[in-house]
Amino acid sequence: MGLGGPLERAVMDVLWAAPGPLRVRELLARLNETAERPLAYNTVQTVAERLAHKGLLARTPDGLAFRYGPTRTREEYVAELMLDALTESSDHGAVLARFAEGVAPEDARELFEALRRRASGEPEH
């Protein structure tokens, strides 16, 4: 399941950048550092709960509160989105070709190398 809006993306960005799971108060403080207008505690708690329900955050007890942390890395999440998008078409070859045409040359080289390693059975580095 994807991110529903800018606040969900902002929450995930903060949690991906954090050294570990955060309580809602900690999350709120970090979000409000860059927010155009201050967010309310209940708003951030609701968004964190929604993301936990979607499976994007894990919720662990911490005293009377909870800590929230990502269930997957940003890279894993983005790769999952890309794979989900690929399944939307019956012509995977055309989608992959169009994707390859649209990426920057340095990204194309990285993709080519990753595919070459996979095809040859080399371990990832």
Image (spheres, rainbow, N blue to C red):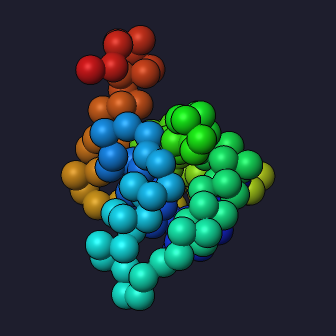
Q: Is residue 70 visible?
A: no
Q: Is 47 left or right of 36, judged from the image as shown?
A: right
Q: Tell me the residue at 41%/88% (across/down).
A: 37
Q: Position of residue 93 (x, y in %)?
A: 61, 48
Q: Position of residue 108 (x, y in %)?
A: 32, 49
Q: Position of residue 61 (x, y in %)?
A: 59, 34
Toward which corner of the image does residue 60 lie, by quadrant? top right
Q: Position of residue 67 (x, y in %)?
A: 52, 42
Q: Is 123 left or right of 81, judged from the image as shown?
A: left
Q: Tell me the residue at 43%/46% (across/down).
A: 22
From the viewer's side, name the closer residue of 12 and 28.
28
Q: How many marks?
A: 0
In the image, is residue 9 above or below residue 95?
below
Q: Tell me the residue at 47%/48% (across/down).
A: 23
From the viewer's side, name the closer residue of 112 and 39.
39
Q: Tell me the residue at 54%/68% (across/down).
A: 41
* Residue found at the far left of this picture: 106
Q: Is 1 left or right of 80, judged from the image as shown?
A: right
From the viewer's side, name the closer residue of 26 and 17.
26
Q: Is residue 48 visible?
A: yes
Q: Is 44 left or right of 90, judged from the image as shown?
A: left
In the image, is residue 121 above or below residue 35?
above
* Residue found at the far bottom of this picture: 37
Toward which corner of the image does residue 46 lie, by quadrant? bottom right
From the viewer's side, name the closer residue of 115 and 41.
41
Location of the C terminus (image quadrant): top left
